[in-house]
Amino acid sequence: MAKNCLCLTAKTIDRNLEILNKYRKFVEIAELRVDCLNQDERLNIRRFPELAGLPVILTIRRDIDGGRFTGGEGERVKMLARGLAFASADTRLNFAYVDIEEDIEVPSLEEAARTFGTKIIRSYHNLEGTVIDIPAKIKSMQRTGNEIIKVAIAVKSTNDVLQIYKAAKACPVKEKIIICMGHLGIYSRILAEKFGSILTYSSALSEKEAAGAAGQFDVQDLAELYRIKKITKKTKIYGIIGHPLKASISPLFFNSIFTQEKMDAVYVPFPTDSIDNILDITKELDVQGLAVTVPYKEAILSKLAKCSETVQVIRACNTVYPVDGKWYGENTDIMGFSDSLLAFMECKNLKRKKITIVGAGGAARAVASEVHRLGGKALILNRTAYKARNLASQYNFRWGVLDEKGIELISKFNDVIIQTTSVGMEGYEAADPLELYTFTGKEAVMDLIYMPPQTPFLKRAAFAGCKTMNGYDMVIRQACFQYKSYTGKEIPHKVLSRINTLGESKWSMIRIG
Ligand code: ATR
């Protein structure tokens, strides 16, 4: 189990203590970032461990390593010495750890630390993201067998994370902290245990002083949502792959179920720039199931050993899990979508309904196939003409592009308008793909996006008096199907209704990194 370490980055000792007390129940260790303290406050760091009442790391991070300390090395060493001075025989009153960068050489400081039981964290920060030979680096960093080695690298790609993971696994050093900084490496912080780290750093992100490294999780989320303290080598891993993957309800949904069902499992966001590399990592991590989201629903197809018939027909897959060590693909979007749309329309099928589908990508293919199955007639409108034409021809639907001519066609297909593109989604441009269309107010309008809860498109529809629905209901329904695919079990009704009481507003707060 990796420990949750809260980085304290406020300007005063008192404020740091206030923050620590607020989040104490979530953490086992705190890091006092002296470089974030006001000058005069830096004189008072010695008593901090006693005041904190839990093991504390003494750190004075330089600006070149991502910290705020801009003074000279002499001054910094003096400050570190002040933190370690007047060591007490009662080690709880001393700093438990001191972070000393691998490139500084101050034997007297190290001697003082060792004498009074302050453990040295020998750290290396690489903000450039250059991938290095980690085992060699660790070997060169280690001065005595009793030190904790910390390597923090700002990763630029999933391949960087993969190389770091492999190196970490191969590294025989027992006490180490390996961090892939930045959005593409966020799962190295949740899966710290699997990366061989003894602790993971978190921030109190709701406090204005939060200034932790890029990709750090909120202290409470790490403890309660990801249950960091419960993750062991045996914990089953599930997750979601996508890019940029800035928001998803899936981690909250699945982790809430795992908690309530007392399952030894964790659901992790895996933002990635490479489908091949993320599949390599998830294989290494023995991941038991993945959701696949934008932009990989089609790209994943060539990586599957087998898939359901629906996936073959619509050429889009949003759910994969290993069968005999090889990926099997399904599409639960499609089931979630039709259940959700029919409930919204309060009908059993779409016979006699005229529908406009905006977009012609993977999501649109799923929507078109269900609209056809349920007896609806549709118009496909897309930015790129040939994709609209290809999709429409499969079902004998009409098609057009998102220009004035295409928009005019909507008047004959305006019982329901379904928006399937990524336009307006969190992390993308906040635009309206149908800006040329004037709503009559009679259309039923569905946007598959749920984050933000109301896209500019949906807002305009609601303002015109249309009945509207976002993709929240659909995503919950498809996630229920996913859970069944992964575990072979239904989500107990009681658990689901408890999760639903969390409400959409809570889900909509879920942002990743
Ligand atoms: P998904 O699996 O989520 O459907 P996709 O297959 O990449 O993702 O499809 C994205 C859809 O959003 C496509 O219809 C795309 O239009 P193009 O076919 O012209 O690429 C649409 N889309 C993405 N960005 C868009 C934009 N800025 N304006 C209009 N449509 C856009």
Image (spheres, rainbow, N blue to C red):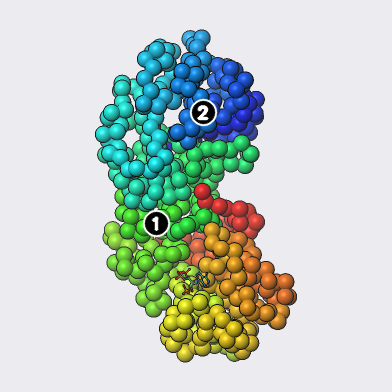
* Visible residue check, residue 168: yes
Q: Position of residue 7 (x, y in %)?
A: 53, 33
Nearest the viewer among 441 and 230 is 441
Nearest the viewer among 256 and 159 is 159
Q: Position of residue 406 (x, y in %)?
A: 56, 85
**Residue that label 2 marks:** 69
Figure check: 142 above or below 4 = above
Q: Which residue is found at the position 52% from the left and 55% from the top?
A: 246
The residue under label 1 is which amino acid type?
A: Asp
**Residue that label 1 marks:** 273
Figure check: 201 above or below 420 = above
**Earlier along the polypeptide chain: callout 1 or callout 2?**
2
Q: Position of residue 385 (x, y in %)?
A: 47, 81
Q: Secondary structure at mark 2?
A: loop
How busy is the neighbourhood of tag 2: few (under 14 within 10 Å), some, or many (20 plus)?
some
Q: Which residue is found at the position 33% from the left and 55% from the top?
A: 277
Going by the image, does 153 lie left or right of 170?
A: right
